[in-house]
Image (cartoon, rainbow, N blue to C red):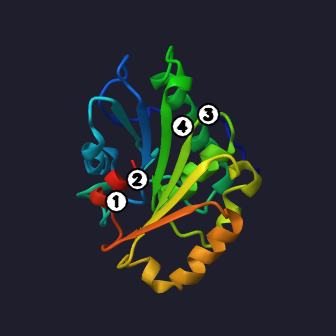
Amino acid sequence: MQKHQITVQKTAHYVTIGEINEQTENVWFVVHGYGQLAEYFIKKFKVLDDGKTVIIAPEALSRFYLKEFSGRVGTTWMTKYERESEIADYINYLNHLYENVLQGVDINKLKINVLGFSQGTATVARWCMNETIKYDRLILWAGYFGNGIEDVIEPKKMTKKEVILCYGKEDEFLLKIDTQQYEMDIQKAIPHIQIHTFEGGHSIDEELLLKIK
């Protein structure tokens, strides 16, 4: 038995709030977590819609039923199976999306924010490490890095970037770990990281979102 792979075309979906025009100053790429859909995830970011901000929510390429064989559908950015291929696929997809939505735009006039939530934190970290895109700020929201954050980033590439970590004090996933050690480990890799917490669980907090915008 021999195992092979080929590259094929696939239809990808994304959702936006706002349109890029002469008044646009800020662009946010917001990347959802495991089991989510972009059309619902992006609603948390409506608070940023001020006429000068455009929000773009890409949707992961792999879909599945959240329970059994029917009903609600969710998506995932990757699994442990064929891990490297899935990472390469979503980076290529996000690069293509970036080029498509910002085609013909002077990106040097924009502040480009890249935010990843939960599973999406590792996704955006790897995407930014690819060094194909121009971005100004990386926001890691409620992400846990099982093998350490240096598994998904190269610290030396972060020295001139603004990096923010956000998480809820009642996050049901992070409560399973020592959050003090969690912060220390990330700060060790990225000493200049800004850390913000909020009273809440595994979610996007709109009040904190407005605070850091």
Q: State the image coordinates of residue 135 (x, y, percent, origin top left).
A: 57, 38
The relative height of residue 207 versus residue 168 in the rendered view (above or below) is: above
Which of 186/162 is in front?
A: 162
N-terminal label among 4 and 1: 4
N-terminal label among 3 and 2: 3
State yes or no: discs 4 and 3 in contact (Cβ < 8 Å).
yes
What kind of element bears circle 3? loop
Closest to the camera, between mark 4 and mark 3, is 3
Q: State the image coordinates of residue 59 (x, y, percent, origin top left).
A: 41, 43
N-terminal label among 4 and 3: 4
Residue at 68 percent of width and 42 percent of height:
130
Q: Which residue is mark 1?
A: 208
Question: Could one spot residue 74 in this view of the protein?
Answer: no
**What's the residue type where badge 2 is placed?**
Ile
Q: Which mark is residue 94?
A: 4
The relative height of residue 140 versus residue 181 in the rendered view (above or below) is: above
What kind of element bears circle 4? helix
Distance Cα–Cα, label 4 vs label 1 = 26 Å
Closest to the camera, between mark 3 and mark 2, is 2
N-terminal label among 1 and 3: 3
Residue at 76 percent of width and 53 percent of height:
156
Distance Cα–Cα, label 1 vs label 3 = 26 Å
Crowding around mark 4 (Cα neighbors within 10 Å: few <14, some 14 to 19, many 20+) is: many
The relative height of residue 164 versus residue 95 in the rendered view (above or below) is: below
State yes or no: discs 2 and 1 in contact (Cβ < 8 Å).
yes
**What's the residue type where badge 1 is placed?**
Leu
Q: State the image coordinates of residue 117 (x, y, percent, origin top left).
A: 44, 57
Distance Cα–Cα, label 3 vs label 2 = 22 Å
Q: Which residue is mark 2?
A: 212
Closest to the camera, between mark 2 and mark 4, is 2
Q: Which residue is mark 3?
A: 133
What kind of element bears circle 1? helix
